[in-house]
Image (cartoon, coloured by chain):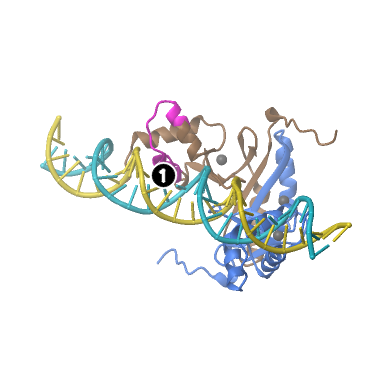
Chain colours: A blue, B brown, C yellow, D cyan
DNA sequence: ATCGCTTTTGACAATCATTATCAATAAGCC
DNA sequence: GGCTTATTGATAATGATTGTCAAAAGCGAT
């Protein structure tokens, strides 16, 4: 049977304080900073559980890290800031339709999709000037 | 200046023989199997170069591996078989529009998107029966 | 074809995220 | 309070990717 531990609660709580997606490593650091003595492996396990129970969304960063976020339930997608990690949940009805269509059109079954938009949010105005 | 080596050509050629996305590790194995003595690091470097030059597409597998494929030029997306790796290039005009709209709507700039559909192709009929 | 300068290679070490181990700990239940 | 067993956490192990650097190979000039 699944047991309730303060560690699980701590991870849930820590995730809730986050505005955007975070890695297990980062969340572990945060927790340590706040005085918690939780172990790294436990954070990994808790996040993995939360994700499979649908209490958190997870995605792969372009660099290949697994990132997590406490999310509203139901299928949705994200607009993510590459700088601060801020994530906005967005509807994507058009995309849902497209994905379904494209899969059936090519005879693919059990189709799932990965759809994320990465950019810089308005607070993270990119300090990049292309042309001088 | 960029030099032409047989290693780069070998990687390009090996990529062309692949129907779907492959990892650097796998491509290296393939090459070795065919008698090539190319080094692993070189395969990584070549793939990375090809990707940044637009000669290959790359994406992160759900497991976090970087996968590559020789692709037609121009922006497009993929429908990928989870079993055999077969990849089909698909148009996604609806998605392009959606992505642009959603980014600007939330004040995000320099937006890029990750859009991939994973499923089982018709040849890889899933041997899974849900209900007995 | 040879020389010389630079890029590229490749064997190997180093990173880094994630997972596996496994004895010690602590839920949930009596 | 005890029992049973899931969970924890320090640490080792794994596995993909990148860094190192001396040796090898392009390429333009001779
Ligand atoms: Zn979400
Ligand atoms: Zn969707
Ligand atoms: Zn493609
Ligand atoms: Zn697109």
Question: Subunit of mark 1?
Answer: B
Locate residue A127, reporting x and y percent: 48, 69
Give the image location of residue B25, x and y in percent.
48, 38
Quarter the C terminus of chain A occupies? bottom left
Identity of the residue drawn at 65% across and 54% down: B97
Name the residue rendered at 77%, 58% in the picture.
A73
Is B60 situated left or right of B8 in this image?
right
Residue at x-position 38% and y-position 37%: B39
| Front-lying residue, A77 or B73 | A77
| Residue C27 position within the rendered picture, expressed as x and y whole percent measured from the top left | 77, 62
Q: Nearer the viewer, residue A7 or A29?
A: A7
Q: Tell me the quarter of the picture where residue B126 sits.
A: top right
Q: Is residue A92 above or below residue B21?
A: below
Side of C5 relative to A107 (left or right): left
| Residue bearing mark 1 | B45
Residue B75 is covered by the magenta coloring: no
What span is colored magenta in the figure?
B30-50
Residue B47 is one of the magenta-drawn residues: yes
Is residue A108 visible in the rendered structure shown here? yes
Mostly what secondary structure, the magenta segment? helix
How packed mark 1 is, by other alpha carbons closer than 10 Å (few <14, some 14-19, many 20 or more), is some
Q: Quadrant of ligand 1?
A: bottom right
């Amino acid at each position: 049977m699944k047991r309730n531990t303060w560690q699980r609660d701590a991870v849930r709580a820590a995730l809730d304080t986050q505005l955007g997606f975070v890695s297990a490593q980062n969340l572990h650091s945060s927790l340590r900073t706040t005085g918690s003595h939780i172990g790294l492996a436990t954070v990994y396990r808790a996040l993995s559980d939360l994700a499979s129970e649908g209490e958190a969304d997870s995605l792969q960063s372009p660099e290949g890290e697994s990132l997590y976020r406490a999310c509203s339930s139901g299928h949705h997608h994200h607009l993510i800031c590459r700088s601060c990690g801020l994530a906005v949940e967005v509807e994507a009805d058009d995309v849902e339709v497209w994905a379904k269509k494209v899969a059936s059109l090519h005879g693919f079954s059990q189709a799932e999709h990965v759809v994320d938009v990465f950019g810089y949010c308005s607070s993270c105005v990119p300090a990049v000037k292309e042309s001088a």
